[in-house]
Amino acid sequence: MEITTEQRGTVTVLSIVGSVDGMTASAMVVSFREQVSGGNVLLVVDFTGVDYTSSAGLRALLETVKETRQRGGDLRLAAVQPDVLRVLELSGFTHILKLFPDTESAVASFPA
Amino acid sequence: MSGGAGDSRQRSGPRVAVVLGSGSVKCAAALGLLKVLQREGIGIDMIVGCSGGSLYAALIALGHDAGTAEAMTRRLWTKELTKRRNNRSILSVFLPRVFGFDESFGMVNDALILDRLKEAFGASTFEEARIPLYLTATDFHTGDQVVFGSGRIVDAIRASIAIPYIFRPWPIDGRLLVDGFMSDPMPVGVAIRQGANIIVTMGFESPYQHKINSPLRFAFQLSSITSNNLLKSNFAFHNLAHHAEILPIIPEFKDSIHLFDTDKIPYVIEEGERAAERQVPYLRRLLSGV
C-alpha cells in the first residue's frame, strides 16, 4: 500500500493505492493518527487507487471518523471504486461516511 | 495450508471459513466460489449456511463438486415446490377459529420440498461432512439464532429454509424454527465463534417487490426491508467487533434473479466465480501472511 499526503488549505488529502486489508490497514491507521494528532482533522481520503477493503479497512476508517468528529472535523471519502463501494454499502458505511465522486468535491465540501 | 476446497477436517495455519447467507437461487453463486477455491487449492476449514445458502453449504461440505451440486439443486429447487397450496392454512387466515390458525402457518404444502431434500441428502448427518458444517435457523418463539452442527442435515436445511408465510416452521428437539435469515441473513458470527481467522462470505439482499398487488407481496416487501437492514447491521457489527478478516464476495447480477429462476443458475455460478476470482490475490496474500 502507498499513502501520499497533500495539504489543500485546511484540508488534508490522503491518497491510498492498493488494498486496505488486514496486512495494510495498520499503515493507514498510523498515517491517519499522525494527521489527527497533528491537528489535521479535516481529512479527505482519496480511494481512486483502492481496489478492495476488508473488515480491517472498515475498522480503520471507523476509528478515524470517530477521532476526527470528536475533534470537530471529519473523514470524507472520494472516488470510491465499485468493489469497495459494495462493501461499504453492505456494511452500512455509506450511512456513516460522506462519499464524494472525486477529491475536488470532497475538499470543497468542507467549509473554507 | 494444503489441499483443495473440500478435504480434511484438520489443517494448520489460519482457519478459513466460508459463510453462505440467504438469497434463494442467487446462493448458487457459491458454486462459482467453490470452483475458484478448488482451482487455487485453497482449503476450507468450516462452512456455514443459512436459508438458501444452507443447501449449498451442505452440498459442498458433503464433498459434491460444483457440477454435481448444480445438477442436484436444479432438480431440487423448482417452481413445483410452491404449486401445492396448504388450503387449510390459507383458510385459517380468514376464519382463524374455524380452521384453527396457529404457529404452524404456511401457505404451501411442504411435502414436496421435504421429499426433494430427502432425495438429495438422504440420511446424511453433519458428522459425515468432509468439512465441518454449521447451518442456522431461527427460534420462532424467542427470535434466537439456532446453530446446527450435528444430527440429520435434512432437518436442519428444512428449518433453515422455512420461508415465512410460505413454508410452515419446522420443529426440531422441541423448538419451532423458521428461516435462518430472520436472525442473521449472513451468519458470519457463527464462523467467528467457531474460531475462523479468515472468513470468505457471500450473501445477498432480499429483492424488493416491483408491484404490491397482493397481501403476500406486501408481507414480502416488509420482510425484505427488515432482513436487508438486519443484514447490514449484523455485517457491520461483525466487521467492527471482531479481528477476524472478513472478505465479502459480492457477485454483481445484471439480470434480475427471482426465487425460482433455476434456469439462470449457470449465469449465477459464473458471476460468483467472477467475483471470487477478483479476491484471489488478496486471499493468497492473507494465507501466506505476506
Image (tube, coloured by chain):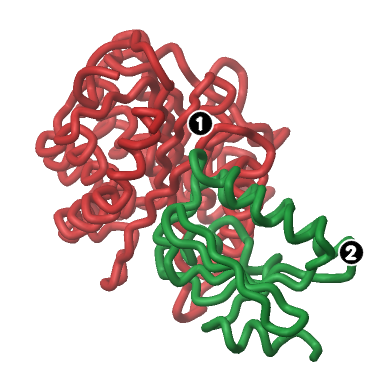
Chain colours: A green, B red
- Front of the two marks 1 and 2: 2
* The N terminus of chain B sits in image quarter: top left
Asked where in the image residue B226 lies, by quadrant, the reply is bottom right
User: Do the residues indicated by labels 1 and 2 lie within the same chain of the protein?
Assistant: no
Residue tagged 2: A71
Q: In the rendering, at what x and y percent does residue B230 appear?
A: 63, 52
Asked where in the image residue A35 lies, by quadrant, the reply is bottom right
Q: What amino acid is at disc 2?
A: Arg
Query: Does residue A90 appear to the left or right of A19 in the view shown?
Result: right
Q: What amino acid is at disc 1?
A: Thr
Tell me the crowding category of disc 1: few under 14, some 14 to 19, or many 20 or more residues within 10 angstroms, Cα based.
many
Q: Residue at x 73, y 51 (%)?
A: A63
Q: Nearer the viewer, residue B233 or B26?
A: B233
Q: Residue at x 32, y 48 (%)?
A: B279
Q: Residue at x 50, y 51 (%)?
A: A20
Chain identity of mark 1: B
Asked where in the image residue A32 lies, by quadrant, the reply is bottom right
Query: Does residue B1 appear to the left or right of B16 in the view shown?
Result: left
Q: In the rendering, at what x and y percent does residue A13 appear?
A: 63, 73
Q: Nearer the viewer, residue B89 or B3?
A: B3
Chain identity of mark 2: A
The answer to the question of whether label 1 and label 2 lie on touching residues, with beta carbons closer than 8 A, is: no
In the rendered view, would you say B260 is above or below A55?
Answer: below
Q: In the rendering, at what x and y percent does residue B268 appear?
A: 23, 56
Query: Does residue A35 appear to the left or right of B78 in the view shown?
Result: right
Which label belongs to residue B89? none
Q: Secondary structure at mark 1?
A: strand
* The C terminus of chain B sits in image quarter: top left
Residue tagged 1: B136
